[in-house]
Amino acid sequence: QLRVLEATARAGGRIRSERCFGGVVELGAHWIHGPSQGNPVFQLAAKYQLLREKDLSEENQLTETGGHVGLPSVSYGSSGVSVSRELVVEMASLFYGLIDQTREFLHMADAPVPSVGEYLKKEIRQRAASWPEDEETRKLKLAVLNSFFNVECCVSGTHSMDLVALVPFGEYTVLPGLDCTFPGGYQGLTNHIMASLPEDVIVFNKPVKTVHWNGSFKEASSLGETFPVLVECEDGACFPAHHVIVTVPLGFLKEHLDTFFEPPLPTEKAEAIRKMGFGTNNKIFLEFEEPFWEPDCQYIQVVWEDTSPLEDVTSELRHIWFKKLIGFLVLPS
């Protein structure tokens, strides 16, 4: 017997597709990263025939990306001037080469610096010292590198790469395959999974108050059977269970850690929840009457010309939040 308690009125969590602007807009999850046979999300999407033929091709599945975001179609400086493709490619090669190096510290007893950000900046500072170009070009190179730092912050879900520990960074498994999207929306995957479940398995608008565990609970209809877990909901309803899988967001766990589990979680688990960090990836959708980009353009990179990864930001984020924008993705219409 399976029962899913959903706090909200809809299924899918951060998967949420909306039809607007003449197409599909993903308010939450957007891509399948590493769409290949080792990826269970890809396997389900292929099973339900939710992907394009090119995304299902063997060629696409075997492509090694190293987990790096593809190069932009075009890059513009914050002054509106186009940044040369050659310079962007050169800086991308430098940045992602260093990212690959950071993964080599996995399982090492001693790391040269604590964080990924500090390692990247140390290596970039050394290389920048020998750049032969004029001062203006050197500044532009650093600004382009800063835009790649912003992209990597999005990938890692962090405000700064200085907050990402260096040694365990290589634990992330990168699967082959070019990242792909759902032509009909990511929500299609949720809908198919929902349709495969028996009726009444999911109970909506059922926020959980406390998970009572490591106990002995009974249910009137179970004729003396005891259960080690009792899930208590905000509305007073209780569900005894042999096993419970908790899938609430980390932020919720941090806020309700002292009351959500009874008895409290073991110290090492509670400390992991308290210490683990996370960031926010937000999207802003813009609609234009006419496209100003070329038909084959997919990603417009924005380079903030007065920024550098080697300089500490002193202004409050609320005053310069726009400089965290990585650019603009062109959505199919």
Image (cartoon, rainbow, N blue to C red):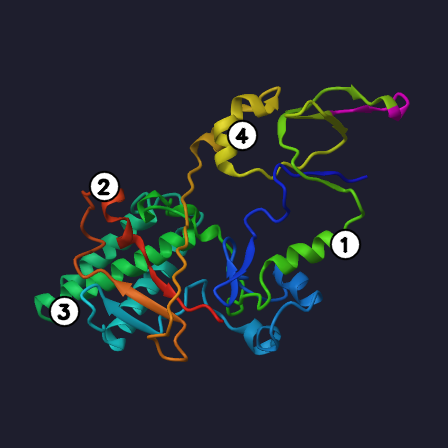
Q: Amino acid at mark 3?
A: Thr
Q: Which mark is residue 196?
A: 1
**Residue farthest toward the front in the current orientation of the protein:** 289
In the rendered image of this protein, does residue 190 appear above or below residue 301?
above
The residue indicated by pointer 4 is: 269
Q: CA distance from mark 2 to mark 4?
A: 33 Å
**Dot 2 and dot 4 residues touching (CB under 8 Å):** no
* Circle nearer the N terminus (4, 1): 1
Residue 225 sits inside the magenta stretch: yes
| Residue 130 is at least partly visible in this image | no
Q: Position of residue 221 (x, y in %)?
A: 88, 25
Q: Amino acid at mark 4?
A: Lys
Depth check, mark 4 against mark 1: the one in front is 1
Write the start and end of the magenta stretch as one range. Answer: 221-228
**Residue farthest toward the right in the current orientation of the protein:** 223
The residue indicated by pointer 3 is: 137
Q: Amino acid at mark 1?
A: Ser
Q: CA distance from mark 2 to mark 3?
A: 28 Å
Residue 90 sits inside the magenta stretch: no
**Dot 2 and dot 1 residues touching (CB under 8 Å):** no
Q: Residue at x 88, y 20 (%)?
A: 224
Q: Residue at x 74, y 28 (%)?
A: 239
Mark 2 crowd level (few <14, some 14–19, many ≥20, 10 Å Cα): few
* Circle nearer the N terminus (2, 4): 4
Q: Which mark is residue 316?
A: 2
Q: Quadrant of the N terminus?
A: top right
